[in-house]
Image: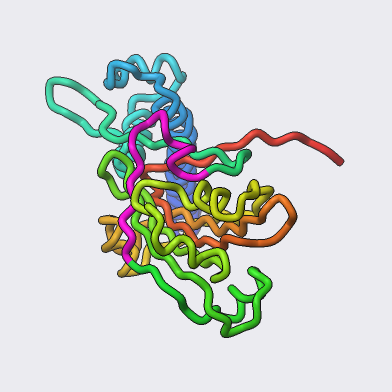
Amino acid sequence: MPPSDRIRDHAGQGATTVAAHRARRRLRADQARQLADLLRHQLLAGGFPAGTLPHETVLATDYRATRNTVRQALDLLRAEGLVDRLPGVGTVVVAQKYPHGLDRLMGLAETLHEHGTVTNEVRTMGPAPAPAPVAERLRVQPGTDVLYIERLRRLNGLPLSLDLTYIPLDIGTALLGADLENTDVFRLLETITGRRLGHAEITLEAVNADTHSAAVLEAPRGAAVLMLERLTHLADGRPVDLEFIRFRGDRITMSGLLHRSL
């Protein structure tokens, strides 16, 4: 075989080796991500009540994974702030996410009452002209004053969400003297109107925290937060509460029960 052919053949073998190595790395990364998903579910469901995860060798056996895959999965969970590695102890749970249901219309304090006390810091509150998108959703004329409220909501003292709320002023005026620090707006709206809330339209997406939101939520700038947009109606169909809620993604998990219908 001519030298030039041998060189090309060797180069081809080298390229094949590199490609195979990259494929193995991708496969291990995929497996680590899959394992992290399974362990995350266990963490959030209280599957490790003692607060310590099994040893890496036990996890590798239980999930039929290599030690390297287990380590990568634990690194992913550590990057999320859910676990940490303590010398002489092992991998321990260091953070908890709180469940927020999406299949019932409830205020935050009602939703999380089993997990502690929700308090509200009212940062801004007062009449403000309704921007066109807000006016359209609340069915008022653009520029009409609505009640604008900005609240930092804490669970057991830890920042959990930043809520921006718009309410028609004929209802919102009665909220000006209400105990917003310790009471859900939903409960106050039902008391003021004498009517039950009926339904809400929601949109949930992940966004990066802007400088203001990150500072208020005590989260890293640019951290991922869960943005919940919710338009709530009274039982008669009138829209009365438009909210833009930024949840700390490392402290809340959303869940719901869905039924299939065609």
User: Quick check: 108 left or right of 144?
Assistant: left
Residue at (34, 33) in percent of width and height = 116
State whether residue 23 is above or below residue 247. above
Q: Is residue 75 above or below residue 215?
A: above
Res 123 visible: yes
Q: Quadrant of residue 211?
A: bottom left
Position of 56 compared to 86: left or right? Answer: right
The figure's colour scheme reads rainbow
Taking the spot 57% from the left edge, 81% from the top edge, the residue there is: 144
The verdict on residue 116 being magenta is yes
In the foreground, 72 or 190: 190
Read off the magenta span: 107-123
Q: Is residue 183 magenta?
A: no
The residue closer to the viewer here, 151 or 3, is 151
* x and y, in percent, of residue 92 in the image: 25, 26
Q: Position of residue 173 (x, y in %)?
A: 49, 67
